[in-house]
Amino acid sequence: MDDLRRAFSYFVVCVFLAAQMSCSEKVNEPDTEPPAVGISYPTDLSTITDQVHILAECHDENGISIVQFFVDDVLIAEDSKPPYDQIWYTGFWLDRQGYVLSVVAKDQNGNIGTSAPVTVTLAKDSECVPELIEPENGSVINLWDEYSFSWRPVHGARGYILKVRTSDFEFNQYFCTSGGPQECFVNLKETIFSGPIMPYNAPPFGDWSADGYWSVQAYWSSYYLSSWSEERYVRFSD
């Protein structure tokens, strides 16, 4: 009877130790499972326009570190907190062809999951164009006076290009939100630029006047730009 009890006790101890070892092995196993990722909106093969709210479904037992949103392999935004969503301003993608959306999620252990691709088509009215405010058509501008160019903001724009031309000169003035380049000093929330224009080809002395035209283009990047606005006529003089 004692031998039977000893054998049973030995069996229980072995089972306990085996369970402990198994649990220990599971705890120490590295996480190699990528996050589950999907795009819930927009749906595949849909036609979209204007501002598109991209919704991503991301899940991982160890937590999501970062979620990246791509349009044709171009990174447009990142998100680190749920709900994982971003606005895509389609007006800067002008050719209206089919575009492929994808979402990439990385978990806390560096595992990467990628959604199935979603192909969408841009509607013809998705194109964005800045709306000019002032100076008004036909205004007279003295070259040496302070003046203002202004336009209504374009949703999603990271910067603007102001183009002024006459028969003697043409120049582009760049304005950006980052403040990095030296010329990016404009307040984009107000979209107002003030200052004198220096016509490089104008005579340095004497009377000078010219018919001028100005227009504005918004941009999301140096490659993704809006259409130019209408040209507005002004008269420059010194």
Image (cartoon, rainbow, N blue to C red):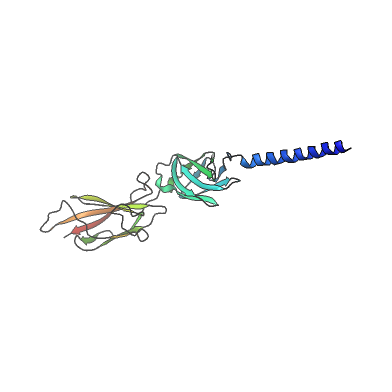
Q: Residue furthest left?
A: 206
Q: Residue 193 at x, y = what percent?
A: 29, 59
Residues 41 and 221: in front is 221
Instruction: Say left or right for 165 vs 60.
Output: left
Give me the residue at 57% from left, 48% from top. 63
Q: Residue furthest front?
A: 2
Q: Residue 150 at x, y = what percent?
A: 32, 59
Residues 227 and 104: in front is 104
Give me the residue at 44% from left, 44% from top. 75
- Residue 136, above or below 86: below
Q: Is residue 209 visible?
A: yes
Q: Residue 173 at x, y = what percent?
A: 27, 52
Residues 143 and 72: in front is 72
Residues 103 and 123: in front is 103
Q: Is residue 134 visible?
A: no
Q: Number of marks in the image?
A: 0
The C terminus: image quadrant? bottom left
Give me the residue at 79% from left, 38% from top. 10
Instruction: Say left or right for 112 vs 203.
Output: right
Q: Residue furthest right?
A: 1
The N terminus: image quadrant? top right
Instruction: Say left or right for 25 vs 87.
Output: right
- Residue 224, above or below 176: above
Q: Residue 130 at x, y = what percent?
A: 36, 53
